[in-house]
Image (cartoon, grey):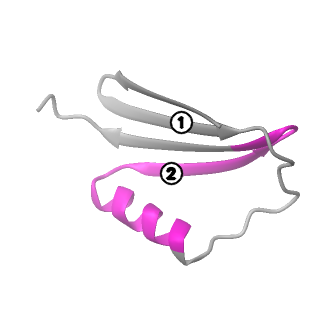
Amino acid sequence: MRWQAAVSLPDLVITVTDNGEGASEITTGVGSARIQERIASRGGAVTMRSLSRGFQLDVRIPHNGA
């Protein structure tokens, strides 16, 4: 697994990638739905996608400089 965090004003961006098998369809379970709700409550967004070799989760949160 690999992860990366960066502040790219005006956002904080966190990316988590693994090198597993990926999936032909991504379904939202209770855990991932809750993550999306919490990030959305901060004005952010979560993107999940299957890669040819693995899975990627991107979290983007507005950064206010604090």
Q: Position of residue 22 (x, y in %)?
A: 83, 50
> Of callouts 1 and 2, which one flags the residue occurring earlier in the amino acid sequence?
1
**12 over 42 or under it: above or below:** above
Residue 46 is labelled as 2
Image quarter of the N terminus: top right
Of labels 1 and 2, the one closer to you: 1
Residue at 24%, 34% in the rendered image:
63
Residue 15 is labelled as 1
Q: Position of residue 31 (x, y in %)?
A: 52, 71
Instruction: State which region is magenta.
Output: 31-55
Residue 7 is labelled as none
Asked whether 43 falls inside the magenta stretch, the response is yes
Sort mark 2 into few (<14), some (14-19) or many (20+) by Cα contacts within 10 Å. Answer: many
- Amino acid identity at mark 2: Val
Determine contact: label 1, label 2, CB under 8 Å: no
**Number of dots carrying numbers:** 2
In which quadrant of the rendered view does residue 10 lie? top left
Residue at the limit of the structure toward the left, as seen here: 66
**Which of these two is toward me, 53 or 60?**
53
Residue at 37%, 49% in the rendered image:
44
Q: As drawn, is 44 to the left or to the right of 48?
A: left
